[in-house]
């Protein structure tokens, strides 16, 4: 147990055995013995390891373990394996805490995920994906309005969402997997909101289109189409842009992005897919976006990032019902007990906001 968790925490921190040993003041050979399970550290070294790896000592002895099934990264080819390993270990730690927390409740506080009943099968044409997205919206009572809090919608319908610090290299594009049949999606915490939302909707597309596409269909392209249709439904696009346009003003795209949380480039794709603008005009605008560098950062204010509140709410729910005590709650939120007490009493609003953002 201890050796596995030490290995996982080291990988999540992106440290070699030699690096970790140097931080703690011991040899890399000692670290290897701990990870091989042939030796256990003293209490002083254990504290040093927890500080070096930024985990509480309780982490090393947490009983619950999970395995990611069917793990699928949305990544660029240049993302190093070392970084992928670190991301995987970081995600597993968050999932373990989430699973452990949910098991404390007499009844599961989160509903099971289920594919919407009655979706088209098989999907023979990409235009039918519009109907699939509309059906999911209808089943989830979302109507045709913009979705202000997409994470809350997914969590409410049984899809766990996790956020990680994956922004330094900007090469991680998301992760989807299952844990004991439970679908999870992982995005970068500090990505622009429209990027988070498109990734979340894209992964929802994988879940809803599973086993519905023909073999010769490009699943990634299909899920991109679903994401756009889910975030900005066909009826809303036609209402906002009309049946046919020769051109769309840049400011107009910015206003629609602000309303629906889909990127300006994504809105142009929607307009092309629905026949509102020509393929040639969309390609012309794509060239302009590349020339201006807008494919990296679009003009105008960024769409606000999504916020994940469910985990914190469950922690305080469990604390209020006395399923856990303060020490366990602090461990689950990965913070010192004194800091947790300040957060619990709301003595410092900034500290509370920072704690929520770091989950």
Image: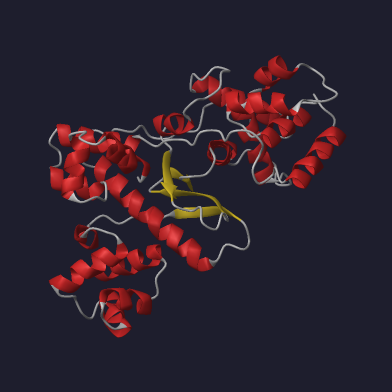
- What residue sits 69% from the left and 17% below the top? 240
How many numbered tags mark residues here? 0
Horizontal side of residue 92 vs 80, given as left or right: left
295 or 309: nearer the viewer: 295
Q: Is residue 57 above or below residue 203?
A: below
User: Which residue is located at x 51 percent, y 52 percent?
Assistant: 167
Quick check: 43 above or below 333? below
Residue at the image point whose x is 82% and y is 21% from the top = 245
| The one of 36 and 307 positioned closer to us in this rendering | 307
Image quadrant where residue 138 sits: top right
Where the C terminus falls, by quadrant? Answer: top left
Q: Position of residue 32 (x, y in %)?
A: 31, 80
Residue 119 shows up from this direction? no
Vertical placement of residue 77 versus 46, above or below = above
| Quadrant assignment, res 4 | bottom left
* Residue 65 seen in this snapshot: yes
> Depth check: 268 or 205 in front?
268
- Please provide percent x and percent y for residue 105: 21, 36
- The image shows residue 59 at horizontal and vertical percentages of 24, 58
**Between 25 and 108, which is closer to the camera in this rendering?**
25
Q: Residue at x 44, y 52 (%)?
A: 165
- Image coordinates of residue 287 in percent, x first then y, are 81, 43
Q: Is residue 115 left or right of residue 298?
A: left
> Residue 232's quadrant in the figure?
top right
In this rendering, would 340 be left or right of 82?
Answer: left
């Amino acid at each position: 147990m201890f050796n596995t968790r030490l290995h996982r925490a080291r990988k999540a921190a992106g440290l070699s055995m030699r690096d970790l040993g140097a931080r703690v003041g011991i040899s890399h050979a000692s670290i290897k013995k701990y990870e091989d399970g042939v030796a256990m550290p003293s209490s002083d070294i254990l504290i040093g390891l927890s500080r070096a790896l930024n985990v509480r000592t309780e982490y090393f002895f947490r009983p619950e373990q999970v395995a990611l099934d069917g793990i699928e990264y949305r990544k660029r080819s240049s993302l190093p394996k070392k970084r992928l390993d670190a991301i995987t270990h970081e995600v597993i730690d968050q999932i373990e805490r989430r699973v452990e927390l949910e098991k404390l409740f007499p009844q599961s506080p989160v509903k099971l995920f289920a594919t919407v009943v009655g979706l088209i099968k098989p999907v023979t044409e990409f235009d039918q994906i519009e109907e699939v997205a509309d059906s999911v919206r209808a089943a989830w009572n979302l109507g045709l309005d913009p979705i202000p809090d997409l994470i809350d919608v997914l969590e409410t319908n049984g899809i766990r969402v996790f956020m990680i610090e994956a922004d330094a290299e900007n090469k991680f594009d998301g992760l989807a997997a299952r844990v004991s049949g439970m679908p999870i999606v992982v995005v970068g915490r500090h990505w622009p909101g429209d990027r988070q939302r498109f990734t979340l909707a894209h992964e929802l597309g994988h879940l809803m289109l599973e086993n519905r596409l023909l073999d010769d269909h490009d699943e990634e392209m299909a899920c991109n189409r679903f994401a756009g249709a889910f975030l900005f439904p066909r009826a809303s696009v036609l209402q906002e842009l009309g049946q046919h346009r020769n051109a769309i003003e840049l400011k107009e795209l910015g206003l629609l992005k602000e309303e629906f949380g889909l990127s300006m480039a994504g809105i142009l794709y929607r307009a092309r897919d629905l026949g509102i603008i020509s393929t040639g005009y969309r390609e012309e605008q794509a060239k302009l976006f590349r020339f201006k560098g807008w494919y990296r950062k679009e003009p105008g204010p960024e769409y606000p990032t999504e916020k994940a509140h469910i985990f914190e709410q469950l922690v305080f729910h469990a604390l209020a019902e006395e399923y856990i005590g303060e020490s366990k709650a602090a461990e689950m939120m990965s913070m010192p007990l004194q800091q947790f007490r300040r957060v619990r009493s709301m003595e410092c609003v900034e500290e509370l906001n920072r704690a929520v953002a770091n989950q």
